[in-house]
Image: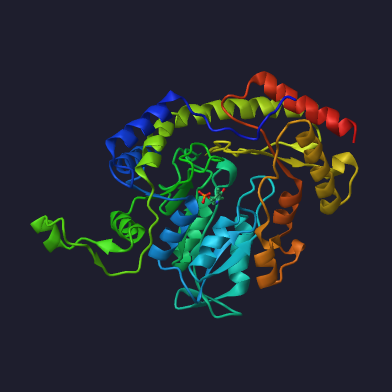
Amino acid sequence: MRMIPVTKPYFTQDENDMIAETLSSGWVAQGPRVAEFEEVIARHEGVAAGIATTSCTTALHLAMTAQGLGEGMDAIAPAFTFVATENAIVATGAVPVMVDIRQDTFNMDTDKLYELIETNYVNKDGKLFNKETGNLLWGIIPVHEFGLCCEIERINDLATAYNLQVIEDAACALGAKYKDKHPGTFGNTACVSFHPRKSITTGEGGMILTNDYSLAKRLRELRTHGSTISADARNKKSGFLLPEHNEAGYNYRMTDVQGAMGQAQARKLDYIIEEKRKRALLYNSLIAEKLPEFVIPYEPENYFHTYQSYVCMLDYSRIGLDSIKSGGEYRNRLLQRLEDVGIATRQGTHAVHMLGYYRKRFGYLPEDYINAYACDHLSITLPLYVRMTDEDMVYVVEMIRKTIDTM
Ligand SMILES: *Cc1c(COP(=O)(O)O)cnc(C)c1O
């Protein structure tokens, strides 16, 4: 059977060589390879500093902690995102407050964000407090979903008006642009992921991007158990003394093996994005021609989509169905049949308010975030990777056409 995976990392001999060289150097924990990788990524994205971590989830947690999020506070995040966005908020002891998304961009609906703040929060001396719980609104965690930046300007305006923090979940958005600028340069901290599902990979891994040098310093300390080397110890160059610990930090360090792999991957980043964008355009035209039941991903003007994932929506009305629920059941049957013939697809991501922990803790109903619910049920990620041929893509679209015709 012909097998088409949903994605496949793009490796060459370069990754092998870089890893082998690191192993023979004898230094495998965080060291020079990670520092070089941080520099390469920061330079590529146009930010002052990169702080590598074990994952984007730990990057988010570290950044949130460093920027003061904790108990008695709310942080707003979109309802349609990978669960790690909300989980990181929960890990700090704060309360995640969700806001719905737009179905066309899959990103936070900023009209609904403004509405949420107006209705649920009260302004006391320029700070916002939750009318029900009394929690301080600390800030917003917008997500640049699937490689498309969110409406960051409107979010920043709100943050400025109410003194809110913003940390961008840019897990999928390394290399993405809004008005020719990358996440990490919009005035906020941004966190990227190097999981194999993302544009480039270090196996597991993440990075915080920031233009704030003092924050970068603090993040590096918190990443290493909260350790600071006192000026005295540094001056004496006394290698036998352990550093001072003024804060209870974490061990979120990336290894040098990963740093080396990341450097090899970083050299391919522009090529990978370019190749994926080409294939996204081909999908767009194949789908326009063959699959009127599918709505293709939207790339608004001024935005540069990296297509970390190519995510369509099933238009259930075109197949004669009348609800999100029945559309979702149809979508699942379709994806099962594709899997049966060797074509791997995925739902885009999930509606976090419908996942067990969040549903039980907050008592959410599906329709509380109706667009997130719809995208959860109707989104379809199609296979997309650098070594995918035009012929593979034609095959995928034709198999979907055939499958729908027989359902
Ligand atoms: C992948 C992803 C994460 C988690 O990244 P890890 O590196 O796997 O921890 C967080 N947020 C979003 C939006 C993601 O897509």
Residue at point 52%, 37% (across, down): 199
Q: Quadrant of the C terminus?
A: top right
Q: Position of residue 274 (x, y in %)?
A: 52, 27
Q: Where is residue 117 in the image (x, y as percent from the top left)?
A: 58, 68
Coloration of the structure image: rainbow
Q: Where is residue 334 in the image (x, y as percent from the top left)?
A: 81, 39
Q: Quadrant of the N terminus?
A: top right
16 to the left or right of 379: left
Q: Quadrant of residue 247?
A: bottom left
Count of picture labels: 0
Relative height, residue 36 to residue 56 (above, below): above
View extreme (top): residue:
391
123 to the left or right of 295: left
View extreme (left): residue:
236
Relative height, residue 323 to residue 44 (above, below): below
Q: Position of residue 351 (x, y in %)?
A: 68, 56
Q: Which of 5 and 24 is in front in this view?
A: 24
216 to the left or right of 384: left
Q: Nearer the viewer, residue 185 or 277?
A: 277
Residue at point 69%, 48% (across, down): 103
Q: Which of 171 and 110 is in front in this view?
A: 171
